[in-house]
Structures are given as C-alpha cells and as structure tokens.
Image (spheres, coloured by chain):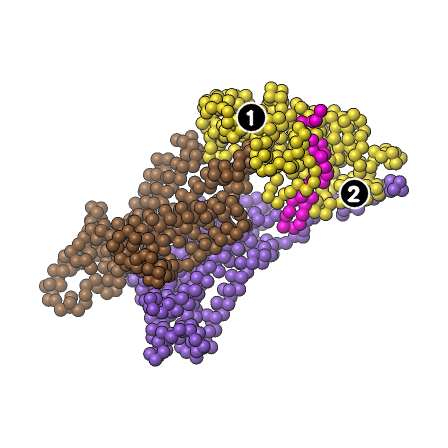
Amino acid sequence: MSRLLEVNQLRVQIETQHGTVLAVRGVSFHLDEQETLAIVGESGSGKSISVKSIMGLLPKNGKIVEGSILLEGKDLVKYSERQMQSVRGSDISMIFQDPMTSLNPTMTIGKQIVEVLKEHRKDMSKAQMKERALELISLVGISNPEARFDQYPHQLSGGMRQRVVIAVALACDPRILIADEPTTALDVTIQAQILDLMRDLQKKIKTSIIIITHNLGVVANIADRVAVMYGGQLVETADVRDLFYETAHPYTKGLLASIPKASEKGSELTAIPGTPPDLMEPPKGCPFAARCTKTMEVCRQYPPEDMLCGENHHVRCWLLDERAKALRE
Amino acid sequence: MDELFVRVHVDESEKEHIAHPNLTAFQEGWLRLKKNKAAVASLFTLIAIGLLALLAPVFSAYSYKETNYDIIYQIPSAAHLFGTDQFGRDLWVRTWMGTRISLLIAFVAAFLDLTVGVVYGAVSALIGGKVDAVMQRFIEILVGIPHLIIVILLMMIMPAGIWTIVVALSITGWVNMARLVRAEILKLKNQEFVLAARVLGTSTSRIIWKHLIPNTVGVIVINAMFTIPSAIFTEAFLSFIGIGMQEPKASLGVLINNGYQVLRNFPHVLIFPAIVIVLIMVCFSILGDGLRDALDPRMRK
Amino acid sequence: MIKYICKRLIYLVLTLWVIVTATFFLMKKLPGSPFDAERFNMMSAQQQHVILEQYGLNESLPKQYIKYMGNILHGDFGTSFTYTGQKVSTVIGGRIGPSALIGIQAVLIGLALGLVLGIIAAWKHNSGIDYFTMIVAVLGVSVPNFVAAALLQYYVALKWGILPVGFWTDWKCSVLPSVALSFSATAMVARFIRTEMLEVLEQDYIITAKAKGLSPMKVLMRHAVRNSIIPVVTILGPIVVNLLTGSLAVENIYTIPGIGSLFVDSIKANDYSTIMGITIFYSAFYIFVVLIVDIAYSLIDPRIRLAAGKEA
C-alpha cells in the first residue's frame, strides 16, 4: 500500500547574489490519508521551501537537486510544468500566510473561487460552478453567500478573507491541503476559529493537511503528527503526544521550554541562545551542534543518523546512540 | 569513532553568526551603485562631456563666432573635427561651447530649483498646520499650469540672454522638488526613530540636522538628477523655436535649429549637437535611475 | 465623492483665473507693439487712435482687464492681430482639428506600444527584451522630440520618400508627426507599467493564482496585468503635457496647421490676444484632463470606488 504522499531525501538549492544556499538538505517524511502533519521550525529552517517544492512553486532561482516526491506513487519531481498545473489546485492545494494580500484585490471573491473550478472541473456548467461556489462560501462559515459572491476582498475582514482562501483551496476536493502559516497573520481569537474550521472541513471533505507553523499551540490544537526542522534538516518526527511528552531532541526540548507558562510568573523567559546556521556553508555535523547544551565531538564531525526511539518516533541526535549512554543525564 | 562521544565546550561566538558587516546607508548605496555598470558608464561619459565642454573651446584654434565663407559646409576633417556650418564656423568649437552654455544654464537652474524647492518643502513640512495647508494650496494652483507655457511667456517679456532663461526655468521647476521634500520630511517626522530621539531629549534643531536632513538628501539628489536634463531639454526647445539663446551665441538648441535648417543637404551640422544632447540626457537618466535604485532602502537585503 | 468633485472644480476655476490674470498682465508688459511699427507711425494720429480704439488699447489698464474678463466669460477672446479681423476663438477653433488628430493618434500609439513593451519587459525581467525596453524607454524620454521629429523627417520622408514631408493634404501627413510625438508617451507608459508589474508580480495573490494550477499566461493576463493597468490612468496627465509642448516643435517641423504652430507664430508676431487665447485654452484643457483622469481612476479601482461608497 503506497502512502498518499512520500517525500524522500529532498535537497533544494537557492541561487542568491551572495552564493548558493542549501535550503533543504536531505529531508524525508510522509503523509497518510486523512491525517494532519505539522512541520515546525524557525524562519530559515527550510520548511516553506520544502512544501513549495511539493507544489512545484519554487522561486525562479530555486531548484530541486535531489530526491523524489511521490503522490500516490507518482514522482512529482519528474512532472512537466503542464502536468504540475493539473495537479495544483485539484490534487494538492496550498494556502498562504497573509489573507490581506493572498486574494486579487480587483476580482470579486466569487470569481476567484469559480476560477479554480473553471480550470479543473470543465465538466461543470457555469450555473453549477456558481452553485458550488456559494456552497463553499457557506461551508467555510461565511453567512449570506449570495451577497458575498459579488464583493471584493477589501470589503471582508481578515478572518473572512482567510476563509475565502480556504474555500478556493478546497473547491476541487484536493487530496492534500498545504497550509503555510495560515494563522500567523490573524488575531488570536480568529486563529482558533480558523483552526476549528480546518479540522471540521478535514472531516467533511476527507482531505489530508500539512500545516507549517512555528507556534506549538497550533500544533497541539490540530496536528496528528509533527516534524521538526532545523538548519534544512528534519531533527525529530513523532506523533503529537509523543512530541510533547516524550521529547527526544534537544532543539525540540528547547522550543518547548521557551513557551512562557502562566504558572511561572516572575521568572525569566528561556530562550535558545544563538542564531541558526548559515546555509551557504552548512555545518558538516549536526546543524544544532553550535547551540546545543549537550554537544559532543561526534556531533560536530558527523551528521547524526536517523534513529527510532518509540513507535513512529524518529530522531536525529547522537545522544540517543548507545555510545553516548554515559552522557545522557 | 567511539572516542568522539565526549562532551565539548561550545564557544559563545560560534552561536551567533552575522551575515555581513555593517555599513552606513551611503556606503551601501555607493557600493550598489558601483555594481550598476550602466550608471557608472553614464557617470564617466558625463564627466568626459563636461571636460570637453570646459576645455575644448580653450584649446581650439578657432573661436565659436569666427566666420569664414571660404570653407562653408565642410564635412568633418582633421582641421575641423565636426566640420563647418553655413557660415564657415568650426562646429567642434561651437558644439562644445554650446554644451558649455547649455550645461551652465541647466546646472544653475537646477540649483535654484533645488534651493527654493527644498526650503519651501522643508518649511511647509516642519511648521505644518495652517501654514502647510496654505503653502500646499499655492502649489496646487501652480501645478495646474503647464510648465512650458509659463516659461515661454516669461521669455517673451524679459530681455534675451542666459540669465533670463535661467530665471524662467527656475520659476516653475522648484515645485516638484518642494513636493518631494515635503513628502519625505513628513514621512520621516512620523517615524519612530524621531519619536525615540525626542524621548531621549534631543533638541529640535538637532533632530532636524542629524536625522531629517541626511535622510532627505537621497531624495534631493535623485530629483536633481532628473531636473538637469529637464532644464537642458527646455532650453534647447526654446532655442529651437527661436525664443531662447540667440545667434551668434551657441547653445545646443541653437545648434540643432541651425542644423535642422540645412538638414536636407548637410546632415552633419545637425548630427553632432544632436548626439551630444541625447548622450547628456540619456546619461543623466540612467544615472538618476541607478541612484534611485541604489539608495532605495527596500532593496537592501 | 460629490464633495471631492466640487472641490476640484473650484480649484479649476481658481487656477484658470490666476492664469488669465497673469497672462493678461504679462502681455501688457511685452516690449514691442503688435502692429507693424513703420506703417503705424506713418498713420495720422487720428487713424492711430481709431485702431487703438478698435482693439481696446486706449483705456486704462484696470478697465481693459475687466472688459477682457467679461468677454472671456462670453467665450470671446478678442481679435487676432495677425489674422486681422478674425476672432481669436475662430482662429483657434479652425486649428484644433489637426492638433487633435495627431495628439490622439500619438496617445493611442503610446499606450499600445508602451503597454506591450512594458508588460513583456516585466514578465521577462532581466532578460534581453527587458533591457531592450529599458533602452527604448530611456531614449524615448531623452531624445528631445524636435530632434526625433527632425531625424524622422530627414530619413523617412526625404531620403526614403515613404511618407510626406509635411503640410496637411491627406491622412498620411499625420503619420510621421504622430509617431514623433508618441516617443515620449511610449517611453513613459512602458516604464510605468513595467514598474507596476514588477511590484504586482511580487504580491502573494500571484502565487495563489499559480497554486490554483493556472498556466503562466492566465496568471499574467488575469491577475498581473489587470492589477497593473489601472494605475496607468494616472500618468495621462503628464503625457498630455508632453504632447502639448511637443506639438509646438513637431507642428513647426512638419508644417502642420495646428494650434502648436499657431502658438509659435503668434509669439514671433507678438499677437497678444491669440497668445492669451491659446494659453488659456491649453491650461484649461490640461486641468480638465487631470480632473477627468482623477475621477476616472476612482471609478475604475474597486478599492477606491467601494471605500468611497461606504463613506457616502
């Protein structure tokens, strides 16, 4: 049984005026039917680039240099641009961070939803498409769809716009929905609403979701499994409970520790000192070696291998090697 | 490899890494400008033209008004690098003399524009309130009148001569600069670093001199870069239709007018001053664009 | 919205008033007389008096001013000094045709060519055609229109004989002048839309469009161009100014019986009333264009149109 989506050893390069950045360095993960995978990491960890590669939406100066992306067994990396166009919007959809700028300001929202239907559902008549668009508008929780259909994006609030964006993405019942920081630009109260919406829709439409975020609260809310990225590599992948309660990688531990807790009033905030590595000249060993509190000599020299430390729980850390048993606290 | 499983101490400095050293806005701008080959080439071309304009007439054997009816309409030769015109005058000297005058007029006019414009815009923005409102109304009315019309009318009532042209050009050109300076200062005034300076107790004049002006210089220089070719064009235009500089004085417009009259049979009389004026305008344009790109903070990554 | 239009109309009237007054006083200061000095001096004092009377030059300045203003409000701009006996308004009216034709053609060429060049340049940013367009734009703005017009005339008309050298016998005579006049318009439009498009192409909704699976051409036309083209309306003002001033030289070179050449001739002949008439005409025309452009822009851009709607 092949999985819905399989990313294997993905390597992506970006050419900049200062040099070549190795943004994604050997990343592998998978996605099954009807599950939600969260990809967590700081800016520059490579998470956005990884998912954009899945869609074939890398910027002009970006290139996949190695690896495969299998959608139900078919390698998307080998697809032509034409083939990718038929995949985008119908098999895999993507929504972005800022709802204020994600919609075309000079097109009515109805038209923008119908546009994606026109592209992939040529079997539908014009009337049917409008019907479906109205259905979608109310599906995403916007009242009075008839009126909204003819309105322009700037006439809607931020939360409503993000709902429209979701409607556009789900119009053709995609197998996978990729959401790149969908709630970051929204108010906290709206964030919760949008996440609830996404969970609901997932059940209704039976789609799988990949959500990118740097907010662990969002992860706890909506994810089934989590993948943590750092310095262009995956450092830990686990089911969501295991990630929070059986945390293995020092970086993940650092992330969890830096969440301020209401019960710890008065004490200093813990941050992870330092900055992420320069990906133009990536470190030869573990990417987190320079900032880890438990660094060993081997960490500097060799990138850690993929180790299993629980069911479905993968980590890349030398500390879990038996030879380091003595140093584990 | 087993022996590698030992703790190491990580140096503080390794944790942070800074992409590239800090430079001031100007230094960065200058570096970026240097990369723009077209802009650099334009700069050099302009310097070359400037030097020729200054020195060529000085070192030539001929004067710009010396006529010699034996050698009229000669095509370029060793003796006369650009040939001669219908009065037997050496075109090399006349072209560079003309360039000198055109450039002089343009620079002085641009300078006047700059001064009036900057002061007007700055005062308007800094004082603000009612004074600003009134000053802006005045500009709005002025803007409704096509620039060239005013210039032509002024040219008609004042005696012909270099200074007339300069004044006429300056009278309407300052408006654009005033608007830009005012917009820039208003924008800066409201930015947080001014508030920060205020909070730290900096005096108003210090704020003006140390913070507002350095940031406005960019806008001023760029606008000046575009005012100069505009002035050159207007002067040439006026002279071409006969109300600018008059014969036997040379300016690029006069020369082109001259050349146009005998274009049918002797194209060389028109070609050389035409090339010079086009080069000047093109170079200022490219340089201006290059400067604008170089000093634009958004481009800094 | 209505408030805005009223405000603008008031400014329009105010500006025109300033122009008329300024022009009036400037004309009075003109050295030299509109009349041929020799013949005038040869006339008897009585005859001179009659002529001055006819043109209303006898009265005191303030009186002349008021009379002039009054006349203008009736559409009477006085009598021309060079075309003796004819009303200025008639003279101007007769010359509008050629200028209008050439002007409109120049704008159309400028828009069509400029849009195509600018859009392609932005779409293929930093490629050969981008540089080519930039060069064309720079040249269009830097080569003075009289130089371009003169060269066009020399090569296309004189040397190759493809099109007429000048005058106004049939439509073909308008081709070269329109082309010469269109250079600056093409350059301005191309440059402007290229800048707009480059900004638009960076926007998130372009990636959203691509994520829908639209082909590059559809993304370009439906999303990129649609958003870039609206602001082009805002440079119509400067384009018109360029055309007005450009027409002075171009009509001169191609001997077109239009308003531009009338203006230049009037200046050379010190024909006060015609000069004033044309000045007022040009200014009014320009201000109207700017006003219409502003109103049009607020109607076309849905963001402004609907935001204004909410307030009203």
Task: Provide residue C139's location: percent of width, then percent of height.
Answer: 44, 57
Q: Which chain is yellow?
A: A
Neighbor class of circle 1 (other Cα within 10 Å; few <14, some 14-19, many 20+) is many
* Most common SS among magenta residues: strand
Query: Which label number is shown at residue A285?
Result: 2
Q: Quadrant of residue B271?
A: bottom left
Look at the picture and state if A106 lies above or below B218. above
Residue C264 appears in the rendering: yes
Residue B167 covered by magenta stretch: no
Q: Quadrant of residue B254?
A: bottom left
Q: Which chain is purple?
A: B
Query: Which label number is shown at residue A172?
Result: 1
Judging from the image, what secondary structure is the residue with disc 1 in?
A: loop
Pointer 2 chain: A
Q: Give, as a three-letter code, the residue at label 2.
A: Gly
Q: Which residues are magenta?
A: A1-29
- The answer to which of A48 and A173 lies nearer the viewer is A173
Residue A11 covered by magenta stretch: yes
